[in-house]
Image (spheres, grey):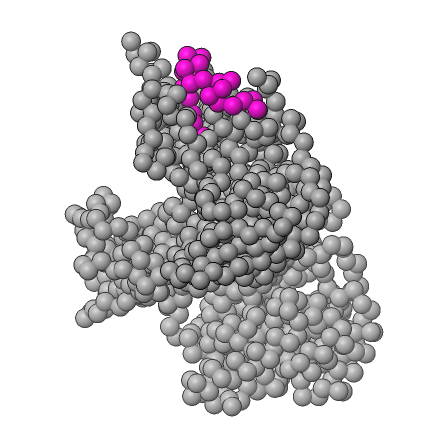
Amino acid sequence: MADLSIEFAGIKSPNPFWLASAPPANTGDQVMRAFDAGWGGAVWKTLGDPIVNTSSRFGGIDYGPMKMMGLNNIELITDRPLEVNLREIREVKKRYPNHAVIASLMTQTKEDWKVLIRRVEDAGCDGLELNFGCPHGMCERGMGSSVGQEPRLAEEITSWAREYAKTPVLVKLTANTGDIVEIAEAVVRGGAHGLSLINTIKSIIGVDLDRLVPLPRVGNAATNGGYCGPAVKPIALQMVAALAREKSIGVPISGIGGIGDWRDAAEFIALGSTSVQVCTAVMHYGFRIVRDMIDGLSSYLDAQGMKSVNELRGRAVGAYKEWGDLDLNYQVVAAIDSQTCIGCQLCVVACNDGAHQCIFTGREEKARPTHAHTVGLAKPPSPFPIGAIAGDRVPWVDEPECVGCNLCQLVCPVTGCITMREVPSDSVDSWNDRVRDGRDRIPGGIHE
Amino acid sequence: MSSSVNGSDLFELARDRDELAIADKKPLFSRNEAVSEALRCLYCVDAPCIKACPTEIDIPTFIRRIGTGDVSGSALTIFAQNTLGASCARICPVEVLCEGSCVYTGWHRDPIKIGRLQRFATETAALPASALPRTGAKRAKHVALIGAGAASLACAAELVLHGHKATIFEKKKFGGGLNTSSIAPYKLHADDALAEVAWIAEMGVELHFGVAFGKELRGEELLSEYDAVFIGVGLGEDSRLGIPGEDGKGVVGAVEWIEQMKLASSPKRALGAVVVIGGGNTAIDAARECAQLGGDVTLVYRRGLEAMSAYAHEVEAARKDGVTIAVDQTPRRFVHDASGNLSGVAFAQTGAPSETIFPAQLAIVAIGQSKVRGIAEQFPGVEVNARGSIVADPKTGVTGNDRVFAGGDSVNGGKEVVNAVAAGRDAARALIARWAGATQLALAI
């Protein structure tokens, strides 16, 4: 069984799975139950000056029968007295000395940071995470994402923390920024030992159409909240990868955003994360989900012949390129397996209305759309593909017209029914190659 | 001739009728159940379920509208093709129609519960008749319809929604035809069927009950007073075996027995041993209903199981209800005791001389229904085929007389209610198109 233990900027953890700073890491009781369930670390719910919360606080967005594809919250940092949190941190570290406990912090003046850092480190935390990411409530008070959107400010506050901290300093970044690399470079200049991203995304989760008030509703009003959950994963993956491939960063990354199972975790690790942090999935299903994450990641690493999770880290970063580097000669075409096709024809409508008009039904030749690459008629295959389940409702692909966009495969409800078959090509040609050779140009660009 | 009434005013259902002892097998979905089932639907393109529906309801669309919370829109989608969508939702053999063709079925997954979703939409939306969209006709025509069953109701509803007038003449005291008098109670009770008739009356359809065609009402009269006639009379009396004892006590035709069970006041006597003779869906219905009412039921069919015309899923359900099925038995005679009460039915193994007597206090003969005679000859040009069915164009329902249309069981020999709805509606659409064309032509001149 592969070794899952990690060391993150000097912080040791039995596995890369940490609770994110959020409601699941609000109390010592929760954190200890999470550690019992198998979590390797926890970033404590952000500590700072006392706040008062609203009721209600959360809003969800469903997709079809699936609940909470995305979650939005307007809860602020901890509403419990600092002394209580510190006592519980001390208790947790005493009982779980080998687990990672990181204190998330948010405060204002340099003096405030100094006091807060001293107190949490006295309580025994293994590291600090500066919350420069929260996009609701706290930012209106000049904290959270309002810091994370100002590189100069973020750099300065990070340097204050470095000045006082004895433990590693992580900085949690907001996704509400034009250039994630710019802000990351700033906090690294300020001395950050590690980066956590992404925090939640500024959002309105929906509107109550009866009252005409946005959600989640607090009386007859609402405010923007922070969006998280499975829906934000692609945004987080890109930002993590963008930092992982940037030579100027060079500090470990704790990946956050829509992680709910071992696959999600493996993807974040392959794109450069050392640890991963989870919130929404725990809020939905509880601490128990970590079992799947531990066992699933171990099995995957074993199957890949990797002895440690560290071998997986960053392995997909090199393949994350600019568009201009992609091979324009690479070609795939859709292939529909007539034996497993159920005849729903969702691929037909997706291709014809939403993509490139190359999937048809029926046995007759079809006129190709006027913008087709190749003129003439699309000819049904012979013999016509009669399906085991769908009979002659099985659609067919006009292969010369297929651009290999994947849409049909994405909408097909039958896993494995539509595959994208690779068409061999004997040369490689990218946009950048074309520009370099003068076969193409970038309008208005420096090559003009 | 009685005055115009709506479907439920005139006819008083017995409060102690037997059908009330039988509960819905597929109760109304809750909103949660309906939405979660609706969200399973793949929203197929050129969907097979639509093609399997005789009325071609746009099923994926009405299901999607349940999923988005637009239940009224869902119901309107259904009624656009089938004004009797509420009853069809409950009585259609969905296993062999829409649900049978659902792509999930072929995939060995549970099909979308289309029937129950349709019931949810139509029943939960509870649209007033005035909510159905209407178009006006340039010149309103008036159609007389004979029989107040599904075919005529669908035809009349379609006509009035397109600005024409429709007057239905029904021999019985109630409307709805078999929906009211014959559908198994675990699918639909008579009061719900009558409510649907009342709803169609609210659309502006005029209904006259207790009018026997051929006596109070003559074909030539209708042809002179109305612009067109629609024949939707269904089938006639239960067919008879023609064996000894059939006229004695305790022997009854299936359609007659079911109508009594559904509509009439019941003395609540124990059913005892019941023999149902026949192998079709009506036989199965009668057998299941007797079993559900506490009878000790044997269904006896003269040929093998594979030759039964009843749906396989219904035969299976009858077994689950406790019905014993005996095959290859030909009925010979009904046996009565000294006081004239039925004691059994004698059968011979098919092809063998010896007799077996099946004990029975009630024998139900379910071997089909006769054809309604004497309608066609009242209209010049209308023909009847060798099987006694009215000859009509399958697409438009037009008969040999271009002002006389027909549809439903009297044309197809006895199919599902949804087939009758499709036929009635299509006849109306043919008339609407004809008259719209004529108007345009007149304007052109």
State yes or no: residue B231 in magenta.
yes
The location of residue B47, given as percent across then percent down, is 39, 49
Residue B138 visible here: no
Q: Which residue sits at x=71%, y=39%?
A: B15
- Residue A389 on the magenta segment: no
* Most foreground residue, A30 or A185: A30
The quadrant where residue A73 appears:
bottom right
Above or below — where is A111 with respect to B114? below
Q: How many marks?
A: 0
Q: Is residue B10 or residue A409 the one in the foreground?
A: B10
Residue B337: image x %, image y %?
Answer: 61, 52
Which residues are drawn in magenta? B208-232
**In front of the other: B405 or B118:** B405
Residue occupying image coordinates x 49% and y 28%: B147
Residue A140 drawn at (x, y percent): 69, 54
Name the outermost residue toward the top. B445
Image point 64% across, 66% down: which residue? A284
Q: Quadrant of residue B389?
A: top left
